[in-house]
Amino acid sequence: MDENIDQLERRCPRLGGPVLFAYCKTSSDDHSVCWKIFDCWWECFDVVGYLKKILPEDKFKKLSNSKPKQKIVSLVELVEQAKKRVS
Ligand code: SF4
């Protein structure tokens, strides 16, 4: 499953061309997860849940606590809550 996720592709707003999700997991200067990863991938799959599962807790918190990402995490949480209400 994780292998399939790594092969997902989308247009990168920073590079202007297609990238694989695998790239987004290592595209920061220090080869860690790109700070825009929640923003870019939340519509494709449960990127919050996925990263929460694979990242050490401190790294996940650091990633999700910056302001732009916090908004996206909140949005994803709202979508998840709405899905639960519907099902
Ligand atoms: S997460 Fe980062 S590297 Fe990946 S598509 Fe978005 S901006 Fe580009």
Image: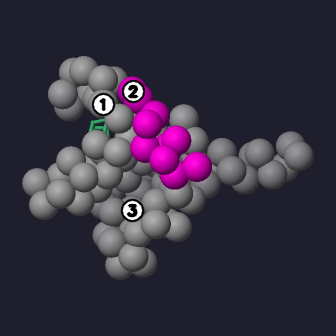
**Residue type highlighted by circle 2:** Arg
**Residue type highlighted by circle 1:** Val
The one nearer the camera, 66 or 6, is 6
Q: Residue at x 25, y 52 (%)?
A: 26
**Mark identifier at residue 82:** none
The residue beneath circle 2 is 10
User: Residue 66: within the magenta?
Assistant: no
Is the C-beta of the residue carrying label 1 under 8 Å from the nearest atom of ligand 1?
Answer: yes
Check contact, mark 3 vs mark 2: CB within 8 A. no
Q: How far across and how far down the image is residue 38, in percent? A: 42, 47
Q: Is residue 9 above or below residue 80?
A: above
Mark 1 vs mark 3: in front: 1
**Residue type highlighted by circle 3:** Ser
The residue beneath circle 3 is 64
Q: Tell me which image quadrant ligand 1 sits in.
A: top left
Gap between marks 2 and 1 measured at Cα: 6 Å
The one nearer the camera, 55 or 6, is 6
Gap between marks 3 and 2 measured at Cα: 21 Å
Is the C-beta of the residue carrying label 2 under 8 Å from the nearest atom of ligand 1?
Answer: yes
**Mark identifier at residue 19:** 1
Q: Residue at x 33, y 72 (%)?
A: 59
Asked if residue 76 lies left or right of residue 51, the reply is right
Can residue 83 be seen here?
Answer: yes
Q: Residue at x 25, y 21 (%)?
A: 17
* SS state under label 2: strand
Q: Is residue 19 above or below residue 72?
A: above
Which residues lie in the magenta part? 1-10
User: Residue 6: within the magenta?
Assistant: yes
Question: How many neighbours does mark 2 have within 10 angstroms: few (below 14), some (14-19), or many (20 or more)?
Answer: some
